[in-house]
Amino acid sequence: MPAPACKLRLACSLAVLATLAFAVSCSSFKTAPVTSIYIQPTAPFVALSTPDQLPLQAWGTDSNGNKKQLTSGVTWSSLSQSVLTIDATSGVPNGVSLGTTTVTARAQGFTATATATVFLSGITAIAVTPTTATVSVSGSSSTNFTAQGTTDTTSMDITSGATWTITPTTTDITCAFTSPNEVCTADANAAPGAYTVTASYPGTSETGTATLTVDP
């Protein structure tokens, strides 16, 4: 057989083998069973009373470690319908009131959960009340703050959803939400002086501040 014809046959054979190998590989990926599922985003933020929200997504990991979005056969639910509702089929969420709730996706015998936060969007200002407060490490060591978020159309209490920080940074003054207030407490080791309490909020660069004075 002439050399060119032999080379041509060899090239064709190799091409066929490569095609078959690729087909087997793809077939293996398609049929590999799902071993777990998860929700994307992992910590969803949903704007309050805002239409046309993007749907949440359910993703699966198969036995080969491959990840792919599950586009059908997923059932969605929300633990607290008073905070957030979600379309059982499409996964489109709707923020009903400010707060957090657990959303659940079920598919192929597996369950995934995520904590969804409903937040006030379009905030143009944040006000912290009171603007000044004093605590004493030898007497009353705690004080309460609240945060009010203002948009172009409304004003709402956002205390529970705000992130509170103390400046200068110290571990001797801590803030924690105890409904309906953010309670800031100075322990016995807190250094006397003035501190800035700052409230920030998702979806906005606006912040609100107050001055906390620690007396001996």
Image (cartoon, rainbow, N blue to C red):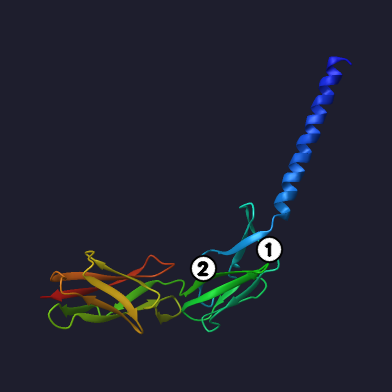
Q: Secondary structure at mark 2?
A: loop
173 sits left or right of 178 in the view: left
Tell me, for residue 99, which label it has, or none.
none
Name the quarter where the N terminus is drawn: top right
Tell me, for residue 71, which label it has, or none.
1
**Residue 59 appears in the picture as rendered:** no
Q: State if disc 2 and disc 1 touch (CB < 8 Å).
A: no
> In which quarter of the view is residue 4 placed?
top right
102 sits left or right of 146 in the view: right
Tell me, for residue 44, which label it has, or none.
2
Tell me the amino acid under the disc marked 1: Thr
- Front-lying residue, 160 or 9: 9
Name the quarter where the C terminus is drawn: bottom left
> In which quarter of the view is residue 89 placed?
bottom right
Q: Could you classify mark 2 by the number of other residues whose Cα lies within 10 Å: few (under 14), some (14-19), or many (20 or more)? A: some
Identified at 72% across, 45% down, the residue is: 25
- Front-lying residue, 140 or 48: 140
Identified at 50% across, 71% down, the residue is: 115
Vertical placement of residue 114 versus 155, above or below: above
Whichever of labels 1 and 2 marks the residue nearer the N terminus, that label is 2
Q: Could you classify mark 1 by the number of other residues whose Cα lies within 10 Å: few (under 14), some (14-19), or many (20 or more)? A: few
Q: Pinpoint residue 96: horizontal percent, then vertical percent.
A: 53, 81
Q: Secondary structure at mark 1?
A: loop
- Front-lying residue, 144 or 209: 144
15 sits left or right of 187 in the view: right
Q: Pinpoint residue 116: horizontal percent, then vertical percent.
A: 50, 72
